[in-house]
Amino acid sequence: MLKWALIFLVISIIAALFGFTGIAAGAAVIAKALFFIAVAIFVIFLILAVIAGETMFGRR
């Protein structure tokens, strides 16, 4: 997912350089959304891994 965020970021930068402001703004919004979704999924999996590690080693 971060790969797609980077792709849209590059598209946004290139479109901005050529003056396509509408396309650049749209691609930037998509890149930003994908980045935050990827961060949220990372945090969820990190919390799940910590919880699974605690139950696996009997710390609960």
Image (cartoon, rainbow, N blue to C red):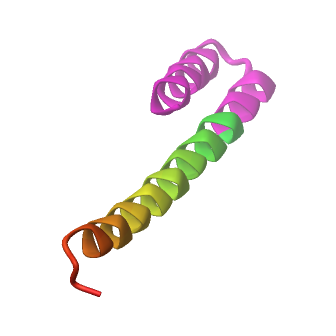
As drawn, which residue projects farthest toward the right? 22
Left or right: residue 20 compared with residue 7:
right
Residue at image location 55% in from the left, 24% down from the top: 4
Q: Nearer the viewer, residue 47 or 11?
A: 47
Residue at image location 62% in from the left, 12% down from the top: 18
Q: Nearer the viewer, residue 28 or 37?
A: 37
In the picture, residue 40 is in which quadrant?
bottom right
Residue at image location 60% in from the left, 25% down from the top: 12
State the extent of the magenta-drawn residues as a range.
Answer: 1-28
- Please state the horizontal and vertical placement of residue 51, each as a whole percent of the image: 37, 72
- Please state the horizontal and vertical placement of residue 47, each as a whole percent of the image: 41, 68
Q: Is residue 2 above or below residue 4?
A: below
Q: Main secondary structure of the magenta part?
A: helix
Q: Nearer the viewer, residue 6 or 28?
A: 6
In the picture, residue 30 is in which quadrant?
top right
Left or right: residue 19 compared with residue 56:
right
